[in-house]
């Protein structure tokens, strides 16, 4: 039986990778990269709950990271380009990325939608040989 609940984990960049903790459960863990962190979260949740509980998987993990840490990790992404692409003032976006301002819920959704759109484009890209 699969678990339907989502657990939100707040992710923080560390010198050796990432750490994550949940305000919903007394679980925290670390990982060298996001993939390892997700795997460690699944393992930590399974250890924290009784074996009779429904199966926990990556689909139950929701990661939350601030923009400054996001752009620090994903250096391949250009924040100015993303701001222009989603129609946001690059100076304001830079303040979000540098941690000087926090985006509103509406702006956060706008940024995530822009990143998701780019992700879908990249996932469907093919190179010629």
Image (spheres, rainbow, N blue to C red):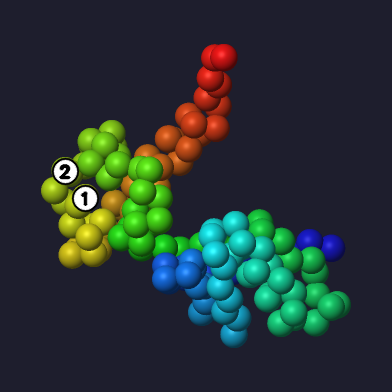
Q: Confirm whether residue 60 shows in the render.
A: no
Give the spatial CA distance, label 1 vs label 2.
6 Å
* Quadrant (top left, top right, bottom left, bottom right) of the N terminus: bottom right
Between residue 109 and residue 57, name the one nearer to us: 57
Question: How crowded is the residue under tag 2: few (<14 C-alpha within 10 Å), some, or many (20+)?
Answer: few
Q: Dot 1 lies on which element?
A: helix
Quadrant of the rendered image containing residue 24: bottom right
Q: Is residue 35 above or below residue 41?
A: above
Q: Residue at the left extreme?
A: 91
Percent x, y of residue 115: 40, 42
Question: How crowded is the residue under tag 1: few (<14 C-alpha within 10 Å), some, or many (20+)?
Answer: many
Between residue 107 and residue 9, name the one nearer to us: 9
Relative to 11, 69 lies left or right = left
- For the point 43% across and 71% down, the residue is 14
Relative to 100, 27 lies left or right = right
* Quadrant (top left, top right, bottom left, bottom right) of the C terminus: top right
Identify the residue under disc 2: 89
Identify the residue under disc 1: 93
- For the point 34% across and 57% down, the residue is 72
């Amino acid at each position: 039986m699969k678990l339907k609940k989502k657990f939100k984990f707040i992710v923080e960049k560390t010198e050796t990778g990432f750490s994550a903790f949940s305000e919903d459960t007394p679980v925290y863990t670390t990982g060298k990269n996001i993939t390892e962190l997700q795997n460690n979260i699944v393992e930590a949740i399974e250890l924290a709950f009784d074996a009779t509980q429904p199966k926990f998987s990556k689909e139950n993990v929701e990661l939350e990271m601030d923009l400054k840490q996001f752009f620090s990790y994903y250096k391949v992404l250009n924040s100015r380009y993303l701001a222009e692409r989603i129609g946001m003032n690059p100076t304001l976006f830079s303040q979000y990325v540098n941690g000087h301002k926090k985006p509103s819920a509406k702006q956060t959704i706008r940024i995530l939608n822009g990143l998701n759109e780019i992700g879908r484009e990249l996932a469907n890209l093919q190179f010629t040989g």
